[in-house]
Image (cartoon, grey):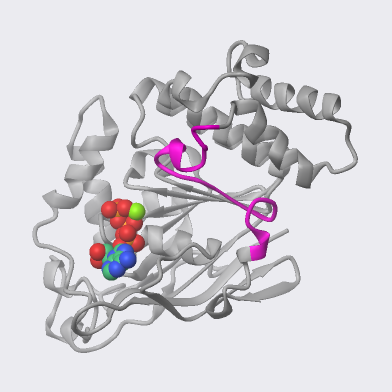
Amino acid sequence: MSVAVSNLSVDYRGHGPDLHAVRDVSFVIPPGKMLGLVGESGSGKSTVAFALMGLLQANARIISGDMQIGGRSYDLTKNATAPLRGHGLAMIFQDPLLSLNPVFTIGAHLIEILRVAAPGESAGRRRAMAEEALAKVKLTDPRRRLDQYPHELSGGMRQRVVIAMALLAKPVLLIADEPTTALDVTVEASVMREICALRDELNCSVLLITHSLGLVTKYCDDMAVLYAGEMLEQGPARAIQRRPGHPYSRLLLDCEVAIDQPRREPAMANSFKVIGGELPDLRRPVSGCVFAARCDRAVADCAVTVPSAVRLDEEGRHKARCLRIGAS
Ligand code: ATP
Ligand code: MG
């Protein structure tokens, strides 16, 4: 089933004017595909994830947006996707402990999911299914793990348990928010492989949120570039890598090449800083392009005219919002 998000806008209330964290964001993730959502810290990536899951904090307000899953439409402003959490929708957080209850064993977590996902099965069969799921995500010694508690496992092992939980929940959409940022680089590749294996086995849509363009170009089918809550470019990851349409995407990719370090994650985190300047104040109304103040290609018009999406391929899958596309 295809997953489509349309016109998502989210504000946060606080002292003073509302903060416009996400503005009019839309994307589609076909079944069995992974979309990489990139953007620097504060660009609104987690806000998108939490809005889809119905997990936003109390001071957040979804101004507009809906999500279509298969043929059905869910109104995000009414938190309509919250009942899908745990089966239609699953999420992997940067910290796996957010998904694990310290007083329950690993087995109890998996069996709890099977109570909903496989209600007809006996207790013994559910235990066997839980063990199989742990073996599938390549957790060593799966039978023993069932009786262990989250604190007895390493970070990478815990993240595998959370992936096994998602495998049993059989979601239509899996959201992974910086799933490897807290892990060793050696563990990162294996956790990414398990997420890809899960996508292939369930033929589900995956939204991978990351700072790392390296991860996106390696593992994702499509890429979406978020900046100050707005989608500046989206399309097939290879196409954006080969021919970025937006100056911001180009700068990010240049940084990726220029910073030739063995560990990619900090390199990418730094690369956002390598692009001079900071995100605009999200409480103030923006005129023109949100990236204009930091853009090396900006002309006077960029500060006043809001760019609309320009198609960069025949099918309209690759789009970027920049007035300077085509200008020399
Ligand atoms: P990071 O890469 O650091 O995780 P992000 O792209 O996930 O960043 P968000 O966490 O979605 O960014 O935050 C987007 C904006 O919304 C930021 O300016 C952030 O400070 C603000 N924000 C997030 N949560 C709240 C909240 N509960 N109340 C007010 N502002 C918030
Ligand atoms: Mg975040």
> On the rendered image, what quadrant is the C terminus found in?
bottom left
Residue 228, visible in the rendered structure: no
| Residue drawn where x is 90% and y is 41% of the image | 120
Quadrant in which residue 133 is drawn = top right
Quadrant in which residue 288 is drawn = bottom left
Q: Quadrant of ligand 2?
A: bottom left
Q: Position of residue 78 (x, y in %)?
A: 57, 79
Q: Is residue 300 above or below residue 250?
A: below
Q: Position of residue 86 (x, y in %)?
A: 65, 51
| Residue drawn where x is 30% and y is 73% of the image | 326
Q: Nearer the viewer, residue 312 or 186?
A: 186
| Residue drawn where x is 24% and y is 88% of the image | 305
Left or right position of 129 against 248 = right
Q: Is residue 121 above or below residue 105?
A: below
Specify start and end residues of the magenta stretch as a single range.
Answer: 83-103
Left or right position of 122 against 128 = right
Left or right position of 3 against 243 = right
Task: Tell me if residue 175 is in the magenta stretch.
Answer: no
Q: Nearer the viewer, residue 76 or 265?
A: 76
Task: Tell me if residue 85 is in the magenta stretch.
Answer: yes
| Residue drawn where x is 60% and y is 67% of the image | 4
